[in-house]
Image (cartoon, coloured by chain):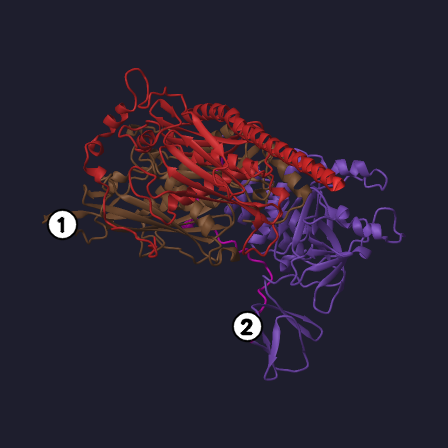
Amino acid sequence: MTGHVSIKLASERVNHCVAANNELPRFYTPGEVISGMQDFMRGHGTYTEDDCLKSSVAGVMQKVNKLICIRPLKSRYVGEIGDVVVGRVLEVQQRRWKIETNSRLDSVLQLSSVNLPGGELRRRSAEDEQMMRKHLQEGDLISAEVQSVFSDGSLSLHTRSLKYGKLVQGTLVKVFPSLIKRRKNHFHNLPCGISVIIGNNGYIWISPQQQDILLEDNKDEIQNYELQPVSRTDRETMARVKNCIAALVASKMMLDDTSIMFAFEESLKYDNVKDLLDPEAMLDIAFLAQHRINTVMED
Amino acid sequence: MPLDFRRFNGPEDSVSYTRFTQDFLKSYDELHNELINKSNLRKDGRALDEARSMFARTDMISQAKGSAYVELKKTKVVCSVFDPREIPHQNEFSQLGQIFCEVKFAPFSCSRQRRPAAPDAEDKSLSVALRQALEPAVCRHLFPNYQIDVFVYIIEHDGACLAAAINAAGLALADAAVPMYDIITASSIAIIGDKMFVDPTEEEEHVAMISPDSENVNHGIITMSMLSELKQVSDFIQIGSMDTDCVIKAMDILEKECAKLIPNIQQVLVMNVVQNIEQQKKLEEEAKEREAALNAKLEEWKTLLNAG
Amino acid sequence: MAGPLLSSTEKIFILHGVQNDYRSDGRSNIDYRPMELETDVVSHASGSARLRLANTDILVGVKTEIDVPKPDNPGKGKIEFFVDCSANATPEFEGRGGEQLANSISNMMQRAYHTSQAFNLKQLCIFEGKQCWKLYVDILILECGGNLCDAVSLAVKAALFNTRLPFVKAALMDGGNVDLQLSDDPYDSKQLDIGCAPLLVTLCKIGDKCVVDPSAEEESCSVISLVVGVTGNPKFYCTEDTTNILNVECKCSTIGMNGPGSVAPKTLKDAINQGIIAAKCLDEALGKALLRERQETIVMKKHSYGFLK
């Protein structure tokens, strides 16, 4: 039994920069004038002074009709209705759960916006309120959809669909929300046999694929299933996906199912998953994945 | 370290007079050879694997909730445990109770130098070690957001003071009726070359801490505390230099030594209860007698009144 | 320090992984994450090193001063460790917040360096009974991403490897006082013999197995960790032919426990053995990296990278 230790020197540091084929966007720095005209609307990351619209953060401009926003790389998540998020229960309160979703303020999951056991159409009783902690506990992870945005920017979530709800065994990877590509679908069963949920808020959940035993009546079985050890092969694939995501993030590449899958396929030339922790291997994978994305885009 | 100006600190650059005595000038080999005589006995007549007999009692300090006194020949330790109190200066709720430990040496406790009044690094590290040893033993979930204070004062130090402190603290906690999973005991061992001194004296510890000139000789001290019934090690502190076989061998010896102390401590605790019960009985009897006397008096008065 | 919040099923996933000897990022139980090392980063120190292990960032500077040796150890120098937990690392360290952690790390280091088989203080002697070198090892925790002890001990060893003591040209006795003349040529200096300097390995108990270099998530699954200090092997640190150097066995120089839990004696024994294996790998990797860097400095003028990235 020997351990694997690698100590690199600073002179051997790799530059994680991967050149994309499209040219770099215009960057703005705080205080920089974006536009002088008044017929634009002030969005996040901007402020007005002397009839000028100025940037308040360092980032790239995003224009939706007349609304101008500046998005920094390291921003916290700004929610939009319909987004898929992964969050962690922080607190159980009266008729609602406080959920941490990487946004500025904690999000809220109302008791009325979850599916409780026993079918859709059911009155919520006082008993349900007392059973809230049985349903979701502090520390539990959930996947949910943004139902509405409150005036202060905090989010109200819902899990009223079978695909949402509590997440069981797996690992969570946290990345910058600005690296997540908005897609129609954020639930993916990757062809390598595991499923990922790419939350819009930058939380990515990697888990083995669910077998369809989630019927309402065999509750004990679900309980058991939650505690079953994950098989070694699943575990290896999950670790590989996790390290691939880390490699893509290190090179600041956009994440979606295609880029993750490309990176995964490129990583297969490294037999040992732990070799992917090496900065050089990470760069290699990110580079190859970017190359494939470029060729796909050209076609 | 900043000086504590409220106390008289004594001259700073003074040296102990023992520096100029014959003993101080002895070389390592002389010190080493002195520890054991020809018949393989130590200076105080013990065999190598023989621990000093432990004397322990509780209720040393009447105002504390629980207290204990432990004596290993010349090592003397007092410990007191106070009622749980809310953790001061804490704004977050803690699910588990905390244990606050403080170990202090008396200024005159050590033979080599006078101890400073303010706690130094050794006091602090002993306090940390003591807390580490006690934490797994106490049912901390029973008093959330509270802390139990454990104070240990080392009156005289003649080796194995951490082990004595842990034993005393375990006994004091039990005496204070703090719920515990198991009785906690500790023992220490000094290793010099191929010899292992169970329950070392200060002199033996001193020699064990000096690195011998020849390379590759094991030396050092190990202190281990155990929850013997649960077969769990709650703290393990090794210092010095030794190979793994030596550590593991010492661990086995210490495990046995810790187990040996259990009956001793159990006896102290049981005796305590027995004494308490006896005392209570005595009090009850006295009360009964008094009541009977009063009743008799009452009858007497009644008859007197009736007669009157 | 309170770790991140985890759900019970996530903890089970990690626990099963440790039992399978396959952790969530593909490492086995005795694998370390890649590290990055640079020595000679602080110009005003006699020796310095910066080590980055995942999110943990340690900067060590060694300052040398001249002191009077202790009366009971006239032929030996002194070494002292100070740890500073900067509030840059986490807001928890603000004020006196990091003091306890800093104390426990410096205590651990002091204990590990106590024995002369780990670090021979005789090499710091200038004039027996009168003058000696005193090394102040200042450890700065710039970023805290778990597994501090291991990172600190590696960085300290690297900084000591980098430390140079000026040669003493002459020492004159002048009525009981010693008058030293030091060489002012920076290249006229000696290196320290740190081949045996100990490395600390933290073993985090998860389930009934132990892992080295735990991630923050793994740390929060564990209630107790064991820190084993293991002396190094000088053969990894010298460029000459290593055959004539005695192969020194790795020995435990200190063992301590951290955390509110307890362990079974059997687990403890296994963990010590595991720690020694891990320390050997660490030592070899560190030696290679340091020698590689020294080679680079000789071949070309070393380009200092420092904190720019």
User: Mark 1 packing: few (<14 Cα in 10 Å), some, or many (20+)?
Assistant: few
Q: Residue at x 47, y 35 (%)?
A: B168
Please state the horizontal and vertical placement of residue C255, each as a whole percent of the image: 44, 35
In the displayed structure image, the side of residue C9 where residue A291 appears, left or right: left
Chain identity of mark 2:
A
Span shown in magenta? A3-32
Q: Which chain is purple?
A: A
- Which residue is at the front of the view, A254 or B188? B188
Q: Amino acid at mark 2?
A: Pro
Q: Is residue C278 above or below residue C175?
A: above
Q: Label 2: which residue? A: A30
Q: Is residue C111 above or below residue A33?
A: above
Q: Amino acid at mark 1?
A: Asn
Residue situated furthest front in the rendering? B308
Q: Colour of chain B?
A: red
Cα distance in 3D space between marks 2 and 1: 62 Å
Q: Residue at x 55, y 72 (%)?
A: A30
User: Mark 2 packing: few (<14 Cα in 10 Å), some, or many (20+)?
Assistant: some
The tag on residue C121 is none
- Which residue is at the front of the view, C284 or B65? B65
Quarter that holds the C terminus of chain A:
bottom right
Is A29 inside the magenta-drawn segment? Answer: yes
Secondary structure under the numbered disc 1 in the rendered image: strand
- Per the picture, the main secondary structure of the magenta-coloured stretch is loop
Q: Label 1: which residue? A: C177
Q: Residue at x 64, y 63 (%)?
A: A104
- Can residue C287 be seen here? The reply is no
Q: Colour of chain C?
A: brown
- Which residue is at the front of the view, B292 or B231? B292
